[in-house]
Image (cartoon, grey):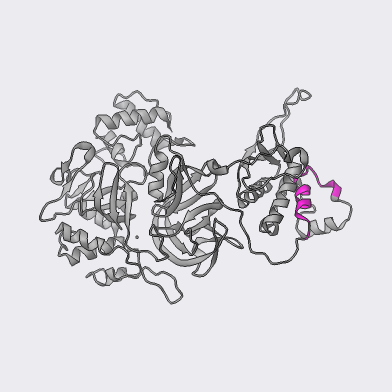
């Protein structure tokens, strides 16, 4: 029966949800209407319904939770004493807090991964870059134009509502960040490997968590915004010179420039309140470069080693310059300098200095950001690929999400902070949500909350290769619920990252380990010392050794 059940699931790979007349994907599929009692779930997220449909078709109604709810399914497995920490061939896995976010069925596994049959997504508030600027993911429709990171025309070919899913924040080394659900796809490159890969957010989290891992997202070509044909009122280079200078006294003479500045809302603006008008931030590539060069020629510096910096008293202007650099295919980070003091020998009392915002780590692989010869000659173009390195993937909340398919040959579009991201599914097809084969990490960030153990008549084997193989009959009662007196797992994975994790959950775990005799400093910061204690504890108790405090390691600390 297990083989029949698994074969039925695999036979559905490639099936997709339906479309409304306007072309929008609608989550409608055959599985709800063909499963007694779940007809109402048509048009809703249907990962659990899909499994119930397969169980019904193979005569396993009594052996599987006939529900559209992942939380209800988890409770069903627990109540039947058929819940385990280990993968089960032909058995379900569950993701997210309490396992309530998503489910699929395991068809193969090894010591590190599980191969599954399962439906991907960005939050509705996530930005998607279009030829006229950013738009909310939730506002996009089929046919809308979007920006292709390689500079080609592209448009939305599918819109896929996904319901409420766990959302993670993906942060790059230059400080840029975007949010996506755990099944959203990313095209990445890994140092030492020639070909790029397409992975889910969860797989990305597992790769980034490996010591010494260097994972990157693609570089961005200069963004080509849609132009109206109307000339800019002030030459962009001149505007950059004026806004980058310490003051604008040279323009206060009643000239035409003053009138144009007034029309742009910049004539009487003091230095801490300067900004770049949207019209200039969305100008053509040539004009945006000229604007940046004007800003850098007055407010920017470049040292003998080629390190570039732009400083302003206005946070908004600094953020606008950062956006300008990124839209031209470069990278930049913004740091503020508050509570600073003067260091001049003529200031013996170290008088407080004005707050400043510094655009640093500027790198421009496509253009020289300076025009003045003394600065331009020191500029050395460098490959900005390292700045596209992913440094962390962290769960932030559960939220309603949506994803899109695009027509670009690369299947890429651009999300928040000018980060290229992938099309809606790993098959490269513009089809909507459907049935897919996936690969997921067994342990670490994004790994399953737990597994159900179906009572197949021919028996089920849940084998952990790292432990030599354990029959399901011996693991089905090993629930991952906290032992009596144990605090509930806080819901985030405690691991070494930058910036370092800090909080009451770290402190609680550290105090528990100290109480059990481990030599650990209970300071609330999860650093390398805590990770080493975690690895030693995991090894002693036969757990997966990764130095990450997930639900299993957390519960074991109190068992």
Give the overall secondary structure of the magenta segment: helix
Q: Is residue 542 magenta?
A: no
Q: Where is the C terminus found, in terms of image quarters?
A: top left
Where is residue 485 shown, x and y percent of the image?
26, 37
| Residue 238 highlighted magenta (yes or no) | yes
For the point 19% across and 63% down, the residue is 55
**For residue 532, above or below residue 400:** above
Front in this rendered view, residue 482 or 283: 283
Q: For this view, does 147 lie left or right of residue 519?
A: right
Query: Which residue is located at x 74 percent, y 24 percent?
Result: 349
Q: Quadrant of residue 264?
A: bottom right
Q: What is the span of residues highlighted in magenta in the rendered image?
A: 233-250
Rendered location of residue 103, percent (x, y): 30, 55
Task: Choose between 283 and 497: the one closer to the eye.
Answer: 283
On the image, the x and y values in percent for residue 557 come to 29, 33
Q: How many marks?
A: 0
Left or right: where 245 falls relative to 24 = right
Q: Considering only vertical position in the picture, is 302 above or below 106? A: above
Residue 50, percent across and down? 27, 63
């Amino acid at each position: 029966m297990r083989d029949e059940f698994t074969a039925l699931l695999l036979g559905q790979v490639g099936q997709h949800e339906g479309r409304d007349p306007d072309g929008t994907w609608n989550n409608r599929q055959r599985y709800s209407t063909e499963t007694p009692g779940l007809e109402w779930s048509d048009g809703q997220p249907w990962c659990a319904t899909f499994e119930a449909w397969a169980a019904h078709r193979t005569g396993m109604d009594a052996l599987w939770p006939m529900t559209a709810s992942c939380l209800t399914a988890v409770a069903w497995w627990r109540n039947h004493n058929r819940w385990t920490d280990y993968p089960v061939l032909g058995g379900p896995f569950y993701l997210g807090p309490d396992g309530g976010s998503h489910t699929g069925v395991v068809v193969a596994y090894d010591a590190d991964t599980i191969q599954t049959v399962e439906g991907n997504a960005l939050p509705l508030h996530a930005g998607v870059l279009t030829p006229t600027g950013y738009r909310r993911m939730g506002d996009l429709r089929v046919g809308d134009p979007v920006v292709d990171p390689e500079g080609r025309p592209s448009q939305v070919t599918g819109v896929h509502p996904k319901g409420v899913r766990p959302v993670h924040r993906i942060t790059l080394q230059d400080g840029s960040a975007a949010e996506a659900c755990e099944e959203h796809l990313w095209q990445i490159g890994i140092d030492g490997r020639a070909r790029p890969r397409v992975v889910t957010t969860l797989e990305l989290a597992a790769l980034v968590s490996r010591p010494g891992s260097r994972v990157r997202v693609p570089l961005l070509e200069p963004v080509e915004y849609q132009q109206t044909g109307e000339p800019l009122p002030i030459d962009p280079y001149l505007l950059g010179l004026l806004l980058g200078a310490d003051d604008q006294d040279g323009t206060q003479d009643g000239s035409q420039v003053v009138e144009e500045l007034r029309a742009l809302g910049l004539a009487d603006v003091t230095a801490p309140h300067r900004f770049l008008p949207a019209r200039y931030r969305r100008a053509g590539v040539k004009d945006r470069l000229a604007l940046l060069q004007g800003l850098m020629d007055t407010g920017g510096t470049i040292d003998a080693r080629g390190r570039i910096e732009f400083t302003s008293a206005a946070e908004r202007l600094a953020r606008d310059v950062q956006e300008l650099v990124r839209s031209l295919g470069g990278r930049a980070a913004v740091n503020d300098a508050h509570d600073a003091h003067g260091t001049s020998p003529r200031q013996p009392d170290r008088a407080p200095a004005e707050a400043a915002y510094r655009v640093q780590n500027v790198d421009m692989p496509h253009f020289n950001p300076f025009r003045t010869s003394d600065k331009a000659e020191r500029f050395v173009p460098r490959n900005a690929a390292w700045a596209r390195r992913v440094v962390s993937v962290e769960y932030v909340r559960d939220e309603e999400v949506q994803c899109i398919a695009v027509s670009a040959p690369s299947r890429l579009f651009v999300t928040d902070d000018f980060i290229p991201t992938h099309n809606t599914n790993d098959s490269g097809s513009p089809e909507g949500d459907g049935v897919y084969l996936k690969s997921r990490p067994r342990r670490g960030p994004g790994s399953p909350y737990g597994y159900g153990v179906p009572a197949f008549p021919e028996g089920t084997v849940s084998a952990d290769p790292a432990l030599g193989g354990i029959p399901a009959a011996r693991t089905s009662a090993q629930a991952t619920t906290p032992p009596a007196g144990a605090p509930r797992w806080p819901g985030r994975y405690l691991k070494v990252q930058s910036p370092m994790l800090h909080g009451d959950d770290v402190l609680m775990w550290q105090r528990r380990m100290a109480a059990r005799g481990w030599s650990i400093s209970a300071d609330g910061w999860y650093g390398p010392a805590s990770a080493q204690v975690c690895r030693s504890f995991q090894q002693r108790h036969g757990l997966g050794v990764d130095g990450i405090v997930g639900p299993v390691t957390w519960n074991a600390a109190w068992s």
